[in-house]
Amino acid sequence: MNFPKRKQKIIEQLNQTGEVDIKQLATELDISEITIRRDLNQLAADGLLYRTHGGATKVNPLERPHSFVNKSAQNAGVKDAICRLAAAQINDGDIIFMDCGSTVFRLCQFIKNKKIKVITNSLPVIYELQDCAVSVNIIGGELDKERQAVHGTTAIEHINKYRATKAFLGIDGISEAGLFANSEHEASITSAFAANSAYTYILCDATKIGKETYLNFAGLNLISAIITNGDEDSLLFLKRNGVTVLSTKR
């Protein structure tokens, strides 16, 4: 069966059930799971479905920004392992900050049954946490359509009114020189979240370790801990600087 025919079958099942499973599709279409994953990744890139770790779900244009959720599904297994470990740090009653990072977004699926309050500038996080046990506080300000997040002076003022027990944040790079971002907007939001949180976690995969990007906006003393899949040797500089390292490889 060629790709156009497989695409038609996948879309038909999505329209009927709202979701598809890789193993089930492989059996029904009599092809390998590798081929199904490739097909789903292509359809996700085309905005025709939302890629999940075990398959895909139907895209509802009124509910989720396609480009963001498809980005969040890239390297999903690694991100989910990081987020499972992050969720284990969260207790009922916590007040947590969550930023607009694609890894941080994947934390949502693991905290929906927790009785906590989430304060966020991320539209995907807001959409994902509606109608669950979590109470959501939406930060006001200017919408960044590309990042699907709220930034700006008003957003910073909003954040400064609150105090969180924990913050879960993403970065574009981290090295001995400190934390790096690709824009001043994101850097200012990250700094504000960290400044108003009792304990700050950075969630990032190994590709961000040792990476230095456009803007070096803060030293390592801004954060309390990092949750990552990085190798132990690559994380030694963090331990030397007093940052707690939680690794998914243990």
Image (cartoon, rainbow, N blue to C red):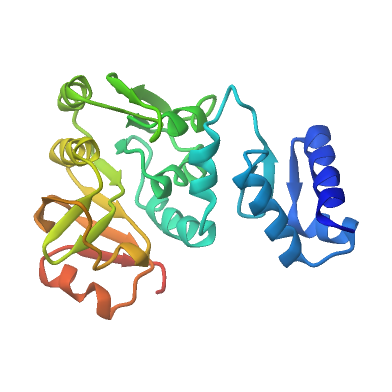
- Residue 47 in percent (x, y) is at 62, 39
Q: Position of residue 99 (x, y in %)?
A: 32, 38
Q: Quadrant of residue 1?
A: bottom right
Give how far across and how far down residue 79 sits, in percent. 46, 57
Location of residue 184 with respect to 154 vertically, above or below:
below
Residue 109 vs 157, above or below: the answer is below
Viewer-proximal residue, 139 or 161?
Answer: 139
Relative horizontal placement of residue 249, taking residue 21 as reference (left or right): left
- Is residue 175 in view? yes
77 vs 7: above or below: below
Question: Which of 105 and 87 lies nearest the eye of the viewer?
Answer: 105
Q: Residue at x 75, y 51 (%)?
A: 21
Split into 4 quadrants, where in the image is the C terminus? bottom left
- The residue at the far bottom in this view is 233
Q: Is residue 163 left or right of residue 60?
A: left
- The spot of residue 205 in percent (x, y) is 37, 62
Front position in the image: 22 or 183: 183
Say which residue appears at 26% left-offset and 76% top-offset. Answer: 234
Count of numbered marks: 0
Q: Going 68% across and 38% down the picture, which residue do you hit?
A: 48
Residue 51 seen in this snapshot: no
In the picture, measured across the screen, residue 183 lies left or right of residue 35, that is: left
